[in-house]
Structure formats: C-alpha cells, structure tokens
Image (tube, rainbow, N blue to C red):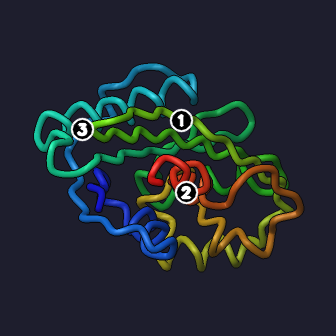
Amino acid sequence: MIRLGSNSQTRALILRNNNIDFIQNGGDFDEDSIKTKDPKSFVYQATLGKYNELLKKYGVEDMPLLVADSVVTANNQLLRKAKDEEDARRMLKLQSGNKTSVITCMIYKSKEKEVIDISITTYRFAKFDEEDIEKYIKSKECFGKAGAIMVEGFCKPYILDVKGFESTAMGLCVEKLIHHLI
C-alpha cells in the first residue's frame, strides 16, 4: 500500500489499472509561488513542494509516499492548467497541428529508498477541429489538466506520432514506478 499525494483522479486511475494498492491524500501546495518559466524546473519544483508538504504531514513510517506533477509545453511555452475557457482555447490552439510535450515528475519515498524521476512524452498532433475544441471546452473535461489536454480522451484521434509512455502524459509514469515497488 502506498500514499498517493495527489488529488488527481487520473493518477488514481493509473494506480488502480495497474493493481497498485493506495490511499489518496492530496495537499495544498501553491504552484503559483513558483516563478520559473522553465518547464522541467517548474514541474520539479511543484512536485518537490507537494512532496515536502506531504512528507511533513504523513512521513513514510506507515507507508511509502508518491507525489507527481505534470506540465505541458508547445511552441516553447509552459502550459499549466487552464484558468478559464479562453485560456483553454488558447492552449489547445497552440497544440493543434503541432508538437506537444508532457513533462511529468514523480517522487517516491519509502523507508528504504527515494526515487526522483522526470519523464517526457512528446506528441505530434493533427490540426484540431474547431467544433471539437468547443465541445471539449464546454464539457469542462479540459479543466484541471496540464495544457488542457487529455491524450486518453479528446486528443486521441488527433495523435499522429508519439514518443514516450502514455502514462507519463496522463500524469504518472507507472512503467518506471512499478520497478521501485517490487
């Protein structure tokens, strides 16, 4: 059993789908306190901030702690979570017909080991249909997602090429995590 230090339902689903027993306890780390615009630095600082908050609160004596965060980049821009419909529209248009990378950082800490990993999955998307963008935004599924994207949902029919793991793009590189749970 591990403690998932995240409020993400997608990360919980990844663990469930891989038969990893967990309890979920997210925190309230303020990502707006991070000033860097460098995507790798940002995602590392966000993950570390969440990790430090939850490590202090829960420790790892009872069970290991797993914390993760993701950011998206397109056209050399750091894309975080959409603040509103216009922000989601802007992010989706940046990614439409373009290369988009999802950078996910995870920190796993047990009594025996500490693992810090940064993984990247890069997609090349076909041009998004304007009507599909509007339906997706109206569905509200784009909110709470880095870059407003869902590679397992809205973006799936537009994927032309992918390099990396889908789980990384969904917020947790389970392929790398599993090796540390054995």
Left or right of residue 24: residue 163 = right
- Residue 91: horizontal and vertical position, in percent? 61, 50
- Residue 167: horizontal and vertical position, in percent? 60, 59
- Residue 147 in sight from this viewpoint: yes
Q: Toward the viewer: 90 or 39? A: 39
Corner quadrant of residue 55: top left
Residue type at the position of mark 1 = Asp
Structural distance between the alpha carbons of marks 1 and 2: 11 Å
Label 1 vs label 3, nearer the camera: 1
Quick one: label 1 or label 2, which is nearer the N terminus? Answer: 1
- Residue 140 in sight from this viewpoint: no
Q: Residue furthest top?
A: 36
Residue placed at 77% from the left, 57% from the top? 96
Tag 3's secondary structure? loop
Residue placed at 55% from the left, 43% from the top? 104
Is 140 placed above or below 176 here?
Answer: below
Residue placed at 74% from the left, 36% from the top? 75
Numbered badge on residue 12:
none
Within 10 Å of disc 2 (Cα), the crowding (few <14, some 14-19, many 20+) is some
Tag 1's secondary structure? strand
Within 10 Å of disc 3 (Cα), the crowding (few <14, some 14-19, many 20+) is some
- Residue 28: horizontal and vertical position, in percent? 20, 44
- The residue identified by callout 1 is 117
- The residue identified by callout 3 is 29
Quick one: label 1 or label 3, which is nearer the N terminus? Answer: 3
- The residue identified by callout 2 is 174
